Image: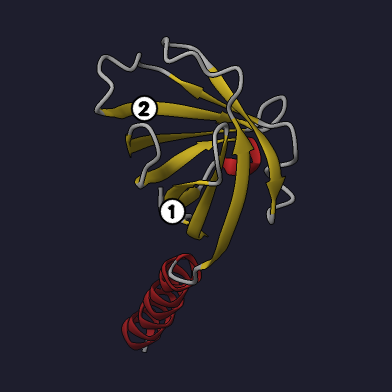
């Protein structure tokens, strides 16, 4: 009898853990719209230069957040660099951007970060709104499996 009870409890616990492990995966598969604009009058093309977010549909990426470009632009043909989106103390996202210079198009991708952006994942098209203004339009989700 104890053996049967042990098997039943083990089966119930295994089922509970299986359902719990599916919850983050299904939650992380839901995607939402991402719309940001930024202005880049302070971007010089040098490593460490930045652009400033002027509008965002995400509360966790407020206006005046900054996007720092980690590599310099070596040629006039394009930008291909890692980036850091700084959205306030303790809140940043790590990503990568490729862009045909001078007017696009391009792609930006984020794959995690810190604070409120810890599980942030996004992919967006980068398009020019007229120098020095740019738009990021795509989707985002939170991958809690990381």
Cα–Cα gap, marks 2 and 1: 15 Å
Mark 2 nearby-residue class (10 Å; few <14, some 14–19, many ≥20):
some
Using the image, tell me which numbered label, if any, was put on residue 82.
2
Relative vertical location of residue 34 with respect to residue 132 in this rendering, above or below = below
Between 8 and 40, the residue placed more toward the observer is 40
Q: Is residue 38 left or right of residue 110?
A: right
Helix, strand or loop at label 2? It is strand
Residue at 46% across, 77% down: 16
Q: Which corner quadrant holds the N terminus?
A: bottom left
Residue 125 at x, y percent in the picture: 41, 53
Residue 140 at x, y percent in the picture: 50, 58
Residue at 33% across, 37% down: 99
Which is nearer the N-term, disc 2 or disc 1?
2
Residue at 72% across, 28% down: 88
Between 58 and 136, the residue placed more toward the observer is 136
Q: Quadrant of residue 101?
A: top left
Query: How is this picture coloured?
Result: secondary structure
Residue 108 at x, y percent in the picture: 40, 44
Relative vertical location of residue 117 with respect to residue 43 in this rendering, above or below = below
Question: Of tags 2 and 1, which is closer to the observer?
Answer: 1
Using the image, tell me which numbered label, if any, was put on residue 22.
none
Between 25 and 127, the residue placed more toward the observer is 127
Residue at 54% across, 34% down: 131
Relative vertical location of residue 33 with respect to residue 94 in this rendering, above or below = below
Relative vertical location of residue 26 with respect to residue 5 in this rendering, above or below = above
Helix, strand or loop at label 1? It is strand
Q: Is residue 103 left or right of residue 128?
A: left
Residue 111 at x, y percent in the picture: 41, 43
Mark 1 nearby-residue class (10 Å; few <14, some 14–19, many ≥20):
many
Q: Is residue 128 left or right of residue 6?
A: right
Which residue is the site of mark 1? 124
Are the residues at dot 2 and dot 1 in contact (C-beta closer than 8 Å)?
no
């Amino acid at each position: 009898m104890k053996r049967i009870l042990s098997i039943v409890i083990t089966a119930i616990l295994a089922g509970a853990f299986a359902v719990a492990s599916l919850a983050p995966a299904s939650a992380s598969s839901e995607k939402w719209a991402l719309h940001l604009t930024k202005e880049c009058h302070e971007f010089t093309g040098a490593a460490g230069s930045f652009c400033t977010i002027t509008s965002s549909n995400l509360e966790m990426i407020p206006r005046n957040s900054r996007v720092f470009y980690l590599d310099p632009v070596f040629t006039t043909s394009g930008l291909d660099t890692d980036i850091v989106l700084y959205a306030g103390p303790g809140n940043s996202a790590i990503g990568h951007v490729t862009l045909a210079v001078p007017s696009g198009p391009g792609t930006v991708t984020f794959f995690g970060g810190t604070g409120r952006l810890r599980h942030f994942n996004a992919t967006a098209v980068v398009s020019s709104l007229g120098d020095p203004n740019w738009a990021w339009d795509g989707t985002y989700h939170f991958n809690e499996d990381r």
